[in-house]
């Protein structure tokens, strides 16, 4: 394979990818560890007869993780199209 020289466009694409990943990991960390730190305080409140901390960590974080994944996919698809690196899908019927 020949050495591939990175262009300014490649570097910009990679910087944006790293920024997006870092930002979403910050949200993930906040939702998981920072909210978990306050679980005992949240458990003093109840929701439908159960401690609020239970709902936040049993259901809320799972929903937040799905939202984080959806945001990543949506933004990366747009970024891929903008930088011309989107995958081309063929709709063949075999």
Image (cartoon, rainbow, N blue to C red):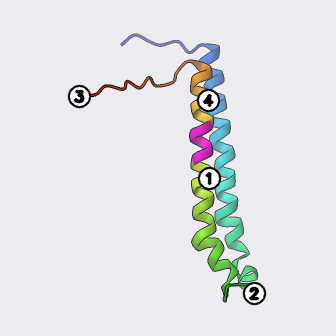
- What residue lies at 64% left-to-right and 56% top-to-bottom? 28
Residue position marked by numbered label 3 in the rendering: 94
Q: Quadrant of the C terminus?
A: top left
Residue 46: give x, y in percent of width and height: 72, 85
Residue 85 placement (x, y as % from top left): 52, 21
Distance CA(mark 2)–CA(mark 3): 59 Å
Establish if 82 lies above or below 28.
Answer: above
Crowding at label 3, few (<14), some or many (≥20) Cα neighbours within 10 Å?
few
Residue 6 in the image: above or below residue 74: above
Specify whether 83 is left or right of 46.
left
The 10 Å Cα crowd at callout 2, few under 14, some 14 to 19, many 20 or more, is: few
The CA distance from mark 1 to mark 3 is: 34 Å
Dot 3: what SS? loop
Instruction: Say the numbered circle drawn on residue 67.
Output: 1
Badge 4 crowding class, 10 Å Cα cut-off, few under 14, some 14 to 19, many 20 or more, is few
Q: Residue 72: say if magenta.
A: yes
**Predominant SS of the magenta segment:** helix
Observer-side mark, 2 or 4, equals: 4
Bounds of the magenta span?
A: 70-74
> Which quadrant would the N terminus be assigned to in this image?
top left
């Amino acid at each position: 394979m020949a050495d591939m020289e990175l262009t300014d466009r490649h570097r910009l694409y990679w910087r944006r990818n790293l920024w997006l990943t870092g930002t979403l990991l910050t949200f993930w960390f906040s939702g998981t560890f920072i909210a978990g730190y306050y679980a005992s305080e949240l458990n003093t409140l109840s929701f439908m007869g159960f401690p609020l901390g239970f709902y936040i960590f049993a259901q809320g974080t799972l929903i937040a993780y799905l939202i984080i994944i959806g945001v990543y996919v949506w933004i990366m698809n747009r970024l891929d199209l903008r930088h011309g690196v989107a995958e081309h899908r063929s709709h063949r019927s075999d």
